[in-house]
Image: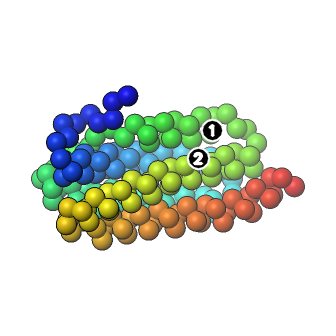
Amino acid sequence: MKLFSANVEDLRSLYVTELQKALDMEQKITKALPDLIQACSDPDLSAAFRNHLEQTRGHVDKVERLLRGHTGEASTETCKVINGLTTAASDTIKDVTDPSIRDIALIGAAQQVEHHEIAVYGTLRRWAELLNLQDTAVLKSIETDEVKADELLTNISRRVNLQAAA
């Protein structure tokens, strides 16, 4: 299995490559969230997705600024993980016809994305610390947003799951 598509020679180049993948990830999430908003029936879930879409647009801007600071441009590397996760979410929208069950499935799909984002930004933040980069605070703020989004989804899922089980 090929892990990296770029020529990675040291931690700094690995960091930049993964930052480029993070940008691709955020851009793809920005494209996927409107479909989730439209597909869900729970108003709290819809509001959470709308709020996270705005946050994600901000994350795109922040990661673009970080990349421009390192490379002079905001180019991307393909994030294969997010491709799989967004495809699975799209399949869920098509495959699950009962609105309450679809909401449960969408929460699960969204939490898988959040967990991946938490891992990505936690890793990038640790590497930035090792490299003594000024990026640490920005990465920590994005990571914190992702943790809060996951917690909100967990809280919504408690109610939605109970309603569907009733």
Q: Nearer the viewer, residue 121 or 102?
A: 121
Q: Amino acid at mark 1?
A: Thr
Q: Residue 74, labelled with which disc?
A: none
Residue at x 58% of width, y 46% of height? 109
Q: Residue furthest top?
A: 1
Q: Residue furthest left?
A: 72
Q: Quadrant of residue 54?
A: bottom left
Residue at x 34% of width, y 50% of height? 22
Residue at x 32% of width, y 62% of height? 125
Q: Residue 109, labelled with which disc?
A: 2
Give the side of residue 23 with respect to residue 155, left or right. Answer: left
Q: Nearer the viewer, mark 2 or mark 1?
A: 2
Q: Amino acid at mark 2?
A: Ala
Q: Nearer the viewer, residue 149 or 120?
A: 120
Residue at x 47% of width, y 50% of height? 116
Picture coordinates of residue 79, whole percent (x, y): 37, 40
Picture coordinates of residue 159, whole percent (x, y): 74, 63
- Vertical comparison of 55 with 7: above or below: below
Q: Nearer the viewer, residue 55 or 161?
A: 161
Q: Residue 92, labelled with which disc?
A: 1
Q: Quadrant of the N terminus?
A: top left
Instruction: Examine the rendering and report whether any part of residue 54 can be seen.
Output: no
Check whether the beta carbons of the residues at disc 2 and disc 1 lie within 8 A of each other. yes
State the CA–CA distance, disc 2 to disc 1.
Answer: 8 Å
- Vertical comparison of 132 with 79: above or below: below
Picture coordinates of residue 2, whole percent (x, y): 33, 30
Q: Quadrant of the C terminus?
A: bottom right
Q: Tell me which label, 2 or 1, sits earlier in the chain.
A: 1
